[in-house]
Amino acid sequence: MTLLKEIGKLGSLAVVFAAALSAAKAAAPVTLDGWRYIDGGDSLHVFVCERGDCVPGSRVFCHVGQRGSAVAPGILRTEERRAAALAGEQSRPPTNAPSVGLDLSGGSRIIETVDDVISRYRTSGVVNNETSQFILVSSATDEQASRANLARFEKALQEISK
């Protein structure tokens, strides 16, 4: 399959790379058609799917740091809560601990339940370029949608990181 066909499958990608990441406020590391960007300040970038074919609640957040730097314990959980608030989602704490599954390819899967009903699937991945590390966390009410959304952003970041 040609690259053009692959891009066509994922929808039109408009990829923009931020030349310099500011510690206080960075531009969106990527943009994808049909995804609304919300600047979370500091190192947080939130993307909310607004395409008609999106699963409701589809959202991806990106934590940007220096390549090779460690992420402080709890920061991704804090950024998940901030991303949900910025996206205007109603916050309802899980009734039991989220189930975590590790993917041997490097990602992870978290299933969050409320009242014993699955409410969200989160998948994560990491993309590096020469100077930056992009930690992506995709969240949706459908597991396949969460994985597909993560793959879209990973592909976009990998394209600009070459």
Image (cartoon, rainbow, N blue to C red):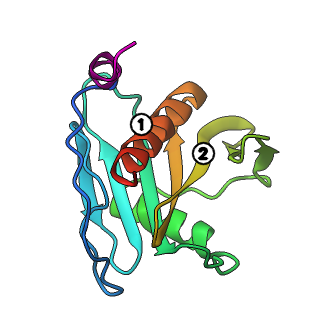
Residue that label 1 marks: 152
Q: Is residue 154 left or right of residue 48?
A: right
Please indicate whether residue 1 sits to the left or right of residue 65 in the image. left
Coordinates of residue 81 in the picture (x, y in percent):
51, 66
Rendered location of residue 10, percent (x, y): 34, 25
Q: Tag 1's secondary structure?
A: helix
Q: Amino acid at mark 2?
A: Arg
- Stretch in magenta: 1-9
- In this rendering, the answer to whether 70 lies above or below 100 is below
Circle nearer the viewer, 1 or 2? 1
Question: Is 138 on the left or on the right of 69, as rendered?
Answer: left
Q: Which residue carries the number 2 mark?
A: 122
Category of crowding for the residue at label 1, using alpha-carbon neighbours closer than 10 angstroms: few (below 14), some (14–19), many (at least 20): some
**Is 158 one of the magenta-colored residues?**
no
The answer to whether residue 53 is above or below residue 138 is above
Q: Position of residue 125 (x, y in %)?
A: 59, 50
Closer-to-camera residue (109/134)? 134
Q: Quadrant of residue 8?
A: top left
Label 1 or label 2, whichever comes before in sequence order: 2
Left or right of 13: which side holds 98? right
- Can you say which quadrant of the picture contains the N terminus? top left
Q: Amino acid at mark 1?
A: Arg
